[in-house]
Image (tube, grey):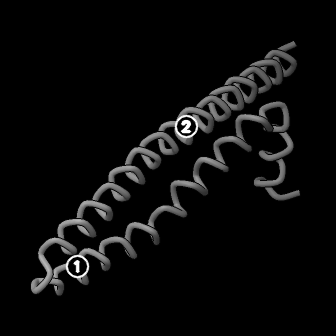
Amino acid sequence: MSSMLRLLKLSRPEWKSVTLGCIAASITGGLQPIFAILYSEIYTIFSLVQKPDEMQIRANLVTGIIALLGLIRLASSTFQGYFLGVASQKLTKRLRQNLFASMLKQVS
């Protein structure tokens, strides 16, 4: 059995934390292309020099959306770090306990 499958099997008790962390990581990663599209939209807004009112309205809208996505990314990155950190900490603790128990069995 590969070591990755063994780790997944050992981390089964923390499946909720791992799942929530992966969902948060997917949200964080999914926001990157949206940011790229919005940045390109800013450049198209600069072409509206002849219509300053429309330029201001669209610039305010796009920057507001970018700010909102930034807050969403902050939250999802925080949740990603927290949930995956909790899962890895519990897995590491369990592995250390198993290692220590195995060492005690060898000494006996």
Give the alpha-carbon distance from disc 2 to disc 1, as whole Å: 34 Å
Q: Position of residue 62 (x, y in %)?
A: 32, 64
Who's the residue at 52% across and 61% down the image? 29
Residue 39 relative to residue 20: left or right: left
Among the 4 quarters of the image, the one containing residue 16: top right
Residue at the (69%, 26%) spot, across then down: 90
Residue 13 or residue 48, whichever sits in front: 48
Give the secondary structure at mark 1: helix
Tell me the residue at 62%/34% (across/down): 83
Would you name the residue on which mark 2 appears? 79
Q: Which kind of residue does numbered mark 2 sit on?
A: Phe
Above or below, comparing residue 74 to residue 39 in the picture = above
Name the residue: 64% across, 35% down: 88
Percent position of residue 31, x then y = 48, 61
Q: Does residue 5 appear left or right of residue 90 in this picture?
A: right
Q: Nearer the viewer, mark 2 or mark 1?
A: 1
Q: Secondary structure at mark 2?
A: helix
Q: From this view, report whether residue 99 is shown above or below residue 11.
A: above
What residue is disc 1 on?
45
Residue 4, position as x, y percentages in the image: 76, 54
Q: Would you identify the image quadrant in which residue 51 lies?
A: bottom left
Question: Which image quarter is the N terminus in?
Answer: bottom right
**Percent from the top left, x then y, of residue 12?**
84, 38
